[in-house]
Amino acid sequence: MAVIKYSFRPQELNNLKAYITGRLIRRYINDVLIPRLKREEKWDQIVYIRAWFTAENMERLLPLDRNMELFILVSMNFFRTPSFLMRFRKLTRLLDNVPDGFIIKMRNTGKNIKYQDAVKCIYPLSPKLVFTWKISTDYRTYIIRRSNYEANISIPIVDGDIEVVEVKSGKSKFSPNQVKSYNKILKNNYILRYYHVNIISFKDNKFEIFEKVIKK
């Protein structure tokens, strides 16, 4: 039996590390951070999703991006107040890079809207049709798909805020473009939640997480 020495290319190894540390932070946010924020800041719902940014050329090439913020909320059975949607959209347009994620924090307003009316704000579909709209991310698949009966269900209208999540590992640092981009959102009163992960041992499943909440 031959013994073959073979290894990942450096970029492939970096991508693998980024994937693992990203998954680790996603688990930490869902298992530890979200319950704590709900308790301490009194939010009704908090979700962690993959992030994006919406540049002018992206708006021309991908019309869905113009309504991505609303689409994500409706796909999770939430609608938004005008001020919440404005703040969400402003964030994605201020960014010049794609962060690792968004933490979406929501409070119920006590008001509701029919699901089909919420979807029609994104795309003018006939209420008589079964509508399907789907987008996949690294974290989950968001789907708008309801029967005519389900289209009449009510979903809560929520107010809220968004945090930006950036994850680094090992010796990786912020790029100049990221520094410029994040400075813009901080000047507009958004929060950047930064995580740095040190891989202590893959074999023993040991990692060290550094967390910093940056507000200015």
Image (tube, rainbow, N blue to C red):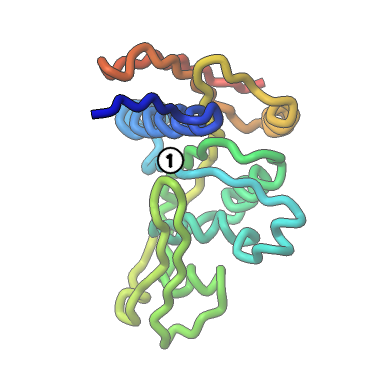
- Quick check: 174 left or right of 134? right
Which quadrant holds the C terminus? top right
- Quick check: 143 left or right of 85? left
Q: Quadrant of residue 141?
A: bottom left
Viewer-nearest residue: 134 or 68: 134
Q: Position of residue 151 (x, y in %)?
A: 37, 75
Q: Residue furthest bottom?
A: 128
Question: From where the camera sits, is residue 172 visible?
Answer: yes
Q: Residue at x 57, y 49 (%)?
A: 84
| Image vertical order of residue 197 relative to residue 9, above or below | above
Q: Position of residue 75 (x, y in %)?
A: 42, 60
Viewer-nearest residue: 42 or 86: 86
Q: Residue at x 54, y 20 (%)?
A: 213
Q: Quadrant of residue 69?
A: bottom right
Question: From where the camera sits, is residue 156 visible?
Answer: no
Which quadrant holds the N terminus? top left
| Image vertical order of residue 137 relative to residue 31, above or below | below
Counting the numbered discs, the total is 1
Which SS class for mark 1?
strand
Q: Position of residue 157 (x, y in %)?
A: 45, 57
Q: Residue at x 65, y 66 (%)?
A: 63
- Indicate the amino acid at tag 1: Tyr
The residue that mark 1 highlights is: 48
| Image vertical order of residue 194 relative to residue 47, above or below | above
Answer few, some or many: residues within 10 Å of disc 1's Cα (few below 14, many 20 plus, some between 14 and 19): many
Q: Residue at x 56, y 15 (%)?
A: 171
